[in-house]
């Protein structure tokens, strides 16, 4: 970041767009946090922050790229690296957490959906080939 970026005066319309993008991203992050606190089960709670945080991160990233690109008079894509990293890691992490929680819930005997990777046991009602 150069001194021009910290002292740059942006046009009003651009400041409004940047502010709206950053505030919308922050509002979505707040919404995800509220969802994390209010939803009752782990499987419901894991969706709110993972999906909404990714969208909020992208909105903040767009505001950052706009601001620093205009302030520095060059394309500033450094914030995109953070957004791409978040967009890749958050869904993978949430899948692993959900699978681990589903495994533990099955081991504890809770009422959860059956595994799709293991054959269904019907108690010997399947027809045998002769």
Image (tube, helix red, strand yellow):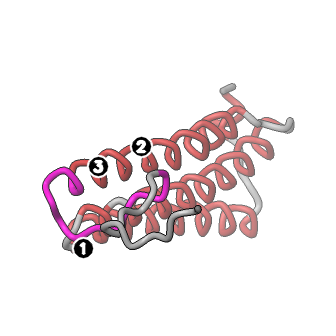
SS assignment at label 2 = helix
The residue stretch that appears in magenta: 105-117
Quadrant of the image containing the C terminus: bottom right
Q: Give the labeled residue for mark 2.
A: 96
Viewer-proximal residue among 29 and 17: 29
Residue for point 38% across, 65% down? 32
From the viewer's perspective, is 5 left or right of 86? right
126 up-or-down from 85: above or below: below
SS assignment at label 3 = helix
For residue 115, what is the image quadrant? Answer: bottom left
72 up-or-down from 125: above or below: above
From the viewer's perspective, is 127 left or right of 10? left
Q: Give the labeled residue for mark 1.
A: 39
In the image, which is nearer the foreground, mark 2 or mark 3?
Answer: 3
Label 2 and label 3: CA atoms lie apart by 11 Å
Q: In the drawing, what numbered circle is on residue 103?
A: 3
In the image, which is nearer the foreground, mark 1 or mark 3?
Answer: 3
Q: In the drawing, what numbered circle is on residue 79?
A: none
Q: Residue 125's spot in the image, x, y percent? A: 38, 73
């Amino acid at each position: 970041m150069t001194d021009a970026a910290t002292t740059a005066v942006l046009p009003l319309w651009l400041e409004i767009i940047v502010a709206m993008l950053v505030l919308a991203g922050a509002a979505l992050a707040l919404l995800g946090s509220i969802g994390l606190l209010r939803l009752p089960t782990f499987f419901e709670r894991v969706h709110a922050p993972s999906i909404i945080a990714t969208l909020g991160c992208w909105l903040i990233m767009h505001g950052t790229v706009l601001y620093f690109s205009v302030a520095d008079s060059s394309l500033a894509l450094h914030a995109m690296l953070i957004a791409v990293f978040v967009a890749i890691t958050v869904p993978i992490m949430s899948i692993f957490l959900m699978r681990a929680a589903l495994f533990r819930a099955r081991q504890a005997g809770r009422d959860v959906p059956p595994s799709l990777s293991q054959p269904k046991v019907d108690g010997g009602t399947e027809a045998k080939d002769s």
